Amino acid sequence: MGFFDFLTEEIAIDLGTANTLIIHNDKVVVDSPSIVARDRASGKIIAAGKEAALMQGKTHENIKTIRPLKDGVIADFEASEQMISMFIKDIPALKKKLFTPSLKMVICIPSGITEVEKRAVKDSAERVNGKEVYLIHEPMAAAIGIGVDITQPKGNMIIDIGGGTTEIAVIALGGIVCDKSVKVAGDVFTNDIVYFMRTQHNLFIGERTAEKIKIQMGSATEDLEIAQDDMSVQGRDLLTGKPKQVDISYREIAKALDKSILRIEDAVMETLAKTPPELAADIYNTGIYLAGGGSMLRGLDKRLSKKTDLPVFIAEDPLRAIVRGTGIALKNLEKYKAILIQ
């Protein structure tokens, strides 16, 4: 094996519903939206990532934008495979190689995933030259990325709010003691905003606009310490069919997202109710950790803290906590062998 080591490259992939991140040589080398554009006539993928994201909602009938992952799992096998392959080819260090190296990969997956879905992720990885493929559960990767020592006999609670799913897990001794996966996350928040603008303002907006509102104005409570400025939103008037603009406040967005956040709160309470008493005592002392893009909603930590009466901490750079953890697991394969799924 030693002689052929230089032919093998190690990469860690966070294959997310909204974004795909890849780490190579301890650096995040790919951070792109999980979206591809396909030419309908030839069936070829003509763009992936940021380039395809710009086309979303603006295509004509010959081009279709596809999000190959839904709720954290592969929905379109072919498109996801080509997307992963395009992202891997984009890694600067691999572009310089004369021939394609074989890859040793660690990929993170949602904790509520089925065996069939695991197989799909593995097959996709093997078809893009993955020789050794390991899978790791998202809450585990998030915990490692946040800096929690998961091998200790001590309970830690992680909430990872991604694009497709919210993963809630209590981790101790390098294993998941109890977990819950709910399909309420970033995508649902975006749809809530689209629905709210339709029903309250008679304004029809696209997914990209709703995503922008969520990032700029997204709020989990109506009483933020630092008030957000109002935002102008353009779309199509449903009554007249003309383009129009309305101003919205963060309080309206908090109202729009309220039901979905309630569902996340309920799932957190359910998980806490299933937690063994010794671990519950640990969580009382350590608090709850938040990771994933959804945890960046303003005031969400305060709201969860109020609901659970526990301190809630947001990971630094929550968007990259999971891929960082996946990268650490890749570097210390021996240490984390027990938690990786081969």
Image (spheres, rainbow, N blue to C red):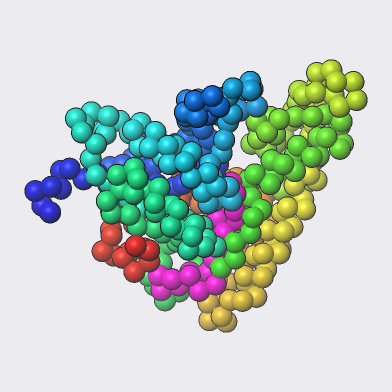
| Residue 165 drawn in magenta | yes
Residue drawn where x is 51% and y is 32% of the image: 36
Q: Quadrant of residue 216?
A: top right
Q: Give the quadrant of the N terminus.
A: bottom left
Residue drawn where x is 77% and y is 24% of the image: 235
Q: Is residue 21 or residue 240 the one in the foreground? A: 240
Q: Is residue 199 left or right of residue 231?
A: right
Q: Is residue 195 left or right of residue 14?
A: right
Residue drawn where x is 79% and y is 29% of the image: 204
Visible residue check, residue 311:
yes
Q: Is residue 122 left or right of residue 115?
A: left
| Residue 336 drawn in magenta | no
Relative image position of residue 277 (x, y in whole percent): 57, 82
Relative image position of residue 48 (x, y in whole percent): 47, 30
Visible residue check, residue 226:
no
Q: Quadrant of residue 7?
A: top left
Residue drawn where x is 52% and y is 60% of the image: 113
Q: Is residue 66 or residue 250 the one in the foreground? A: 66
Magenta segment's dominant SS is strand
Relative image position of residue 141 (x, y in whole percent): 43, 57
Q: Quadrant of residue 281?
A: bottom right
The magenta span reads: 159-178
